[in-house]
């Protein structure tokens, strides 16, 4: 297989993946209604749902990280078999940063939900 053919295949695959992610993100956010700020009960529920979704994403990413860890080249942090990518990359650290980011977002959403629960009284 020629270099150009592999590159075209990789670019088409990346385009399809990004297109799917954008389509999923816009579909999920379009269906999600945002309650009025003065309705503290609904705001609390909305933030609790956001916290739950972020925790689920963090768990999914942890599962994906475990799958990547089964591949010895990713576990060491080297990506040598991928065309166009070589040398040292810190893939395990990237997974940790993503997981931490979603976990922090969930924690913050839970705190805001508690604040709205307190405002209801």
Image (spheres, rainbow, N blue to C red):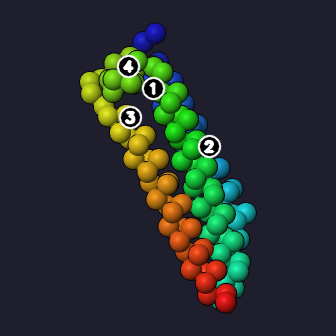
Q: Are marks 1 and 3 in contact (CB under 8 Å)?
A: yes
- From the viewer's perspective, is the residue at label 3 or at label 2 nearer? 3
Tag 4 or tag 2, which sits nearer the N-term? 2
- From the viewer's perspective, is the residue at label 1 or at label 4 nearer? 1
- Badge 4: few (under 14), some or many (20 or more) residues near its Cα, within 10 Å? few
**Residue under label 4:** 73
How many callouts does the rendering have?
Answer: 4
Instruction: Say which mark, if any, is on residue 20.
Output: 2
**Residue under label 1:** 69
Q: Are marks 3 and 4 in contact (CB under 8 Å)?
A: no
Residue at the (47%, 47%) spot, across then down: 99
Measured in 3D between alpha carbons, the distance from the residue under mark 1 to the one under mark 3, in whole angstroms, is: 8 Å
Residue at the (35%, 39%) spot, across then down: 93
Q: Is residue 116 left or right of residue 98?
A: right
Query: 11 above or below 22?
Result: above
Secondary structure beneath disc 1?
A: helix
Instruction: Say which mark, if any, is on residue 10.
Output: none
Q: Position of residue 44 (x, y in %)?
A: 65, 75
Measured in 3D between alpha carbons, the distance from the residue under mark 2 to the one under mark 4, in whole angstroms, is: 27 Å
Residue at the (45%, 26%) spot, across then down: 69
- Badge 2: few (under 14), some or many (20 or more) residues near its Cα, within 10 Å? few
**Residue under label 3:** 92
Tag 3 or tag 1, which sits nearer the N-term? 1
Q: Position of residue 110 (x, y in %)?
A: 57, 67
Check the picture and name the quadrant holding the C terminus: bottom right
């Amino acid at each position: 297989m020629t270099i150009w053919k592999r590159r075209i295949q990789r670019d088409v695959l990346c385009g399809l993946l990004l297109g799917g992610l954008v389509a999923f993100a816009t579909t999920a956010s379009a269906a999600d209604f945002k309650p009025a700020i003065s309705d503290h009960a609904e705001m609390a529920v909305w933030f609790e749902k956001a916290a739950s979704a972020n925790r689920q994403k963090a768990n999914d990413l942890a599962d994906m990280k475990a799958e990547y860890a089964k591949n010895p080249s990713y576990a060491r942090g080297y990506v040598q078999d991928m065309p166009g990518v070589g040398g040292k990359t810190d893939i395990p650290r990237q997974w940790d940063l993503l997981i931490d980011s979603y976990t922090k977002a969930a924690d913050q959403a839970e705190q805001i939900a508690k604040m709205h629960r307190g405002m209801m009284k």
